[in-house]
Image (cartoon, rainbow, N blue to C red):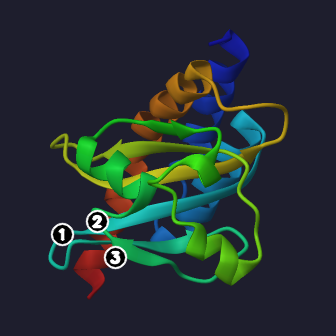
Amino acid sequence: MSIEIYQRIADFGKRLALLSTVEATLPAIAEEAKAIITAERCSIFMIDRDINMLWTKLSDGIGRIAIGLDSGIVGLCATSEKPQISNHPYEDSRFMAKIDEKSGFVTRNILAVPIFNSKQAVIGVIQLLNKYHGDFTESDEGIMSFFANYVSGALELALLMEENQK
């Protein structure tokens, strides 16, 4: 990873620290993730362990998505606690093509990385779709894993603040 990417992530962290709501934090994280990796879309899935579901408060270009915790590439990322890359999703049995069919979007490739909380439990997944230039690589996976770890504290804090306001 180049020093420029580390610096960009550090600078983003300073901006992220000024945000205190989930509604402000998630879009900022998604936009920065897309910019760093140069991907077309980013969705951030949060885990609801009470009902074993993954859901999006933010899903770039499509309405809210809710899937079972054991569903799709995002579900495997969450349950295995490991990043997942699929550069040929329509040939991948884990891919949930029905979401593309419903939205009219065509997914060319996917990178999903887990977001861990301070107790090292997965609280969500950052999913990037359609890298603009080529396939997702192990380098992209490493960068996004670092990014997810870097932003997890701000996201966890925003979630706790939202929970306390209920």
For this rendering, which residue is in front, 16 or 37? 37
2 or 3: mark nearer the eye: 2
Q: Residues within 10 Å of mark 3 (few under 14, many from 20)?
A: some
Instruction: Look at the picture and state if 166 lies above or below 48.
Output: below
Q: Amino acid at mark 1?
A: Arg
The residue beneath circle 1 is 49
Marks 1 & 2, CB-CB < 8 Å contact: yes
- Expressed as whole percent of the image width and height from the top left, the position of residue 5 reads 68, 22
Q: Residues within 10 Å of mark 1 (few under 14, many from 20)?
A: few
3 or 1: mark nearer the eye: 1
Q: Secondary structure at mark 3?
A: helix
Which residue lies at the image location 18% right of the left edge and 69% below the top edge?
49
Marks 2 & 3, CB-CB < 8 Å contact: no
Q: Amino acid at mark 2?
A: Leu
Which residue lies at the image location 59% right of the left edge and 74% below the top edge?
99
The residue beneath circle 3 is 162
Between the C-alphas of marks 2 and 3, the distance is 22 Å
